Amino acid sequence: MTSKKSRKKPSPKKPPREKTVVKRGSRPASAVRIIRTIDNMRALVREVRLRKRSIALVPTMGFLHEGHLSLIREARRRAKLVVVSIFVNPTQFLPGEDLDRYPRDLPGDRRKVAAAGGDVIFMPEAAEMYPEGFQTFVDVTHVTRDLCGAARPGHFRGVATVVTKLFNIVQPDVALFGEKDYQQLQCVRRLAQDLNLPVQIVGLPTVRETDGLAMSSRNVYLSPEERGQALAISRGLQKARRLFSAGERDSSELTAAVLDILRNQSGLEVEYVTVCHPETLERLPAIDREAVILVAARVGKTRLIDNARLKGTGRR
Ligand code: AMP
């Protein structure tokens, strides 16, 4: 005996429904929700947490480029909800820096976040993040003392404070940062560890233009001539890498080689070239195992930073 049920033919009038395949690259900008208030962000976080879904946070100041997008793509792989914050944080700018003219492009950023697989842009107003009477700051003391910390006093206090606030608001399981801002990454790692914040900090490699220039929102300030001059920075770092691979372990030799390239570049003013321990950022006179070489320089009015990890099996 055959059951009628199992023999039921599909209705000829109804063709099988096609699955809509949404390619990540083709997601419309409107797929990304924009949240402007802390209350609304918290409401979404509560909802997502109730459903036991994981959250990734990519903190940025906007005007997104491939470096940011590499963080968003990795965030997509690691969590169910990907939040990209766009906040030009006033407390990390010194008087006279580029806070007021920092480049902005929300429509472009929204399209890029959508294409990279982000779900939400969180962009609070400065007045909501720092209301009247605000007086609590987070200070990461040691790792922020030298390098950019010396050149931009108060900068990392602003960074550590806003990152802590963003962590408290978004409650991410994982937060992603670029090695491009190497000292910032170590500062955030330290603060998450020291304050027992339940968030995994992931650092990703610097994304570069094809000619080697580290991508940065601030590159837009460079004239074509300055952009050419800025290439000396990545050239210098490449030279340091080559010397390290050839067995050079004396930091003064490595910095001298980089300085030689930078000082021979017209239009470029060196701020520092330093070889440091990759986690503590203490200066290393000689490299035992691995290190990072960090550079800051001014090209015209634009301050640029870059770095290279020195590790691996170079001859000794
Ligand atoms: P910003 O918008 O400059 O504050 O940067 C936001 C995040 O993107 C930080 O974690 C940066 O380190 C990271 N980032 C910026 N430029 C790059 C780059 N060229 N490659 C990788 N990450 C980057």
Image: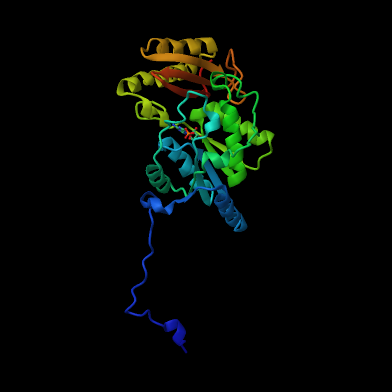
Task: From the viewer's side, name the closer residue of 16 and 112.
Answer: 112
Residue at 46% across / 44% down in the picture? 73
Q: Position of residue 117 (x, y in %)?
A: 44, 48
Residue at 44% across / 87% down in the picture? 4
* Residue 173 seen in the current view: no
Task: From the viewer's side, name the closer residue of 287 and 74.
Answer: 74
Judged from this view, the residue extending furthest toward the front is 132
Task: From the viewer's side, name the closer residue of 39 and 246.
Answer: 39
Q: Position of residue 241 (x, y in %)?
A: 46, 20
Whether residue 303 is situated above or below residue 49 in the rendered picture: above
Quadrant in which the C terminus is drawn:
top right
Residue 191 is drawn in which quadrant? top right
Is 196 displayed left or right of 119 in the figure?
A: right
* Residue 170 seen in the current view: yes
Residue 200 is drawn in which quadrant? top right
Q: Position of residue 310 (x, y in %)?
A: 52, 22
Residue at 45% across / 27% down in the picture? 98
Q: Position of residue 242 (x, y in %)?
A: 44, 18
Whether residue 213 is situated above or below residue 112 in the rendered picture: above
Whether residue 240 is situated above or below residue 183 in the rendered picture: above
Task: From the viewer's side, name the closer residue of 3 and 203.
Answer: 203
Coloring scheme of the render? rainbow
Whether residue 92 is situated above or below residue 34 in the rendered picture: above
Residue at 60% across / 24% down in the picture? 144
Is 70 displayed left or right of 278 in the figure?
A: left
